[in-house]
Image (cartoon, rainbow, N blue to C red):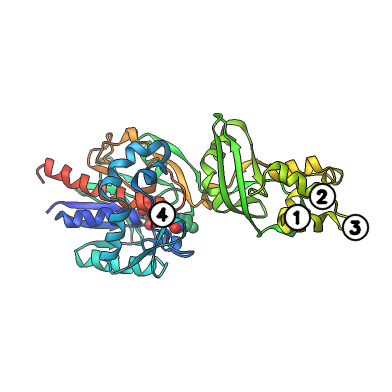
Amino acid sequence: MPRAIVIGGGPAGLMAAEMLLAGGAEVDLYDAMPSVGRKFLLAGKGGLNITHAEPAEKFLTRYGSRQTQLEPWLQSFGAQQLRDWVQGLGIETFIGTSQRVFPKEMKAAPLLRAWLHRLRAAGARIHVRHRWTGWTADGGLRFAAPSGEKIIRADCTVLALGGGSWARLGSDGAWVPLLAARGVAVAPLQPANCGFDIAWSTHFRERHAGQPVKAISASFTDASGVAHKRNGELMVSAYGIEGSLVYALSAPLRDSITAQGSVTLQLDLAPDRDLARVLAEVSHPRGSRSLSSHLQGRLGIKGVKAGLLREALRAAEMHDPQRLAATIKALPLQLTAARPLDEAISSAGGVAFEALDEHLMLRELPGVFCAGEMLDWEAPTGGYLLTASFASGRTAGKGVLAWLAQQGR
Ligand SMILES: Cc1cc2nc3c(=O)[nH]c(=O)nc-3n(C[C@H](O)[C@H](O)[C@H](O)COP(=O)(O)OP(=O)(O)OC[C@H]3O[C@@H](n4cnc5c(N)ncnc54)[C@H](O)[C@@H]3O)c2cc1C
């Protein structure tokens, strides 16, 4: 029986292990942490958005410039196959708002428990507290284990080491120099689905950090001249902004900051009314009412939205109806930096697709396959990250089996 090693016990590594076991391989899975699937469990904390129910063509567009590379993974294991697979573990799923798919209980823990039980029953040996640290000169895998260094040999290896965010959950990106040293092209890991820094005034930060800004639209033109626009809500934080609307725009925002040092995001605080209507409302005689109650009464602008206007305009400008209306429709926020990778929901960058064959085997290292977030793709939140991580794990697992067969093992 061929022996396969999987390193990394997140969704991608566990899925690769499942494919290998199904194909008759003996599988040992190693993870640096005291237990596997820690990021997956965290993903389940606010409701595990496992995939998305939009049509497959639309789904694929979420992977931006990597659609061609991801298409074969998703064709064989897309959203519906993932839902069926989850159901096979005894977990029902449902389609929630905006077509996002969740397990009925919303959590990751029951799914992970059932899955690990099934993997162990199929023969998987799971070794925790084993940190992979590279290769020996003759190709042995080196692990730092509680009992000291271990050298392990195998017919083939799947690396599923994750990206570089939330390092305390295990995926710390420490694999980047290990692969680069072996001639594997790796694009630098960068924050994806992340917040951004804004130099708020102390007054604004103290009053409004932690507050959501609801029912707005945000737009900007990126460094290559492409216009982006999204509706939704964001969250003001002490350092700047975060939340679903910001994450959805985070890739081009990040790339524009890298290209030009900063980027201006424009918020439309009244997206349901055009500029002429907003101007009419702010110009409407307000009698003895304060400007604040006038804005609240006529446009529903109060609290953090009013705070944003005062942050953008001087007192005299607040009383200039043209200026005020224009700012309500296009409030400029200067974003100066993406938040650090460790705080991001996911990572962009990783092992370059040119370094891999279509089975996800490293061209420089025959018999070594890669899967999951450690590959150079990114996607917004909405279940796309997990779907592609699972699907790539299957692709790599199947690739290993084909390679083993080709080697006559
Ligand atoms: C707060 C948060 C919420 C999220 N919510 C969602 C969501 O709702 N929907 C969604 O689709 N995605 C979500 N994600 C993203 C999703 O969790 C990841 O994309 C996914 O877990 C990536 O899977 P992976 O198997 O590639 O890597 P990981 O899950 O990161 O697993 C990698 C594993 O490799 C191990 N490892 C790393 N280095 C070594 C080493 N040197 N030796 C041994 N083991 C090592 C790690 O310990 C870890 O167990 C969320 C992420 C975060 C942080």
Residues at discs 2 and 4 in contact (Cβ within 8 Å): no
Q: Quickly name the residue at label 1.
A: 298
Mark 1 packing: few (<14 Cα in 10 Å), some, or many (20+)? some
| Amino acid residing under circle 2 | His
Q: Position of residue 32 (x, y in %)?
A: 37, 57
Task: Give me the C-alpha separation between circle 4 and circle 3.
Answer: 51 Å
Task: Give me the C-alpha separation between circle 3 and circle 2.
Answer: 12 Å
| Residue 318, numbered label | none
Question: How many marks can you see?
Answer: 4
Q: Quickly name the residue at label 2.
A: 284
Asked whether mark 4 lies closer than 8 Å to ligand 1, one says yes
The residue located at (27%, 34%) in the rendering is: 363
Height in image: 388 above or below 18? above
Mark 3 packing: few (<14 Cα in 10 Å), some, or many (20+)? few
Is tag 4's residue or tag 3's residue first in the polypeptide sequence? 3
> Along the line of sight, which residue is nearer the eye, 322 or 136?
322
Quadrant containing the N terminus is bottom left
Q: Is residue 193 left or right of residue 400?
A: right
Residue 72 seen? yes
Height in image: 364 above or below 166? above
Q: Quickly name the residue at label 3.
A: 288
Provide the secondary structure element on which disc 3 rests: loop
Residue 325: quadrant of the picture? top right
Provide the secondary structure element on which disc 2 rests: loop
| Residue 383, numbered label | 4
Mark 4 packing: few (<14 Cα in 10 Å), some, or many (20+)? many
Tag in front: 1 or 4? 1
| Amino acid residing under circle 4 | Gly
Mark 2 packing: few (<14 Cα in 10 Å), some, or many (20+)? few
| Amino acid residing under circle 3 | Ser
The residue located at (75%, 48%) in the rendering is: 309
Task: Give me the C-alpha separation between circle 2 and circle 1.
Answer: 9 Å
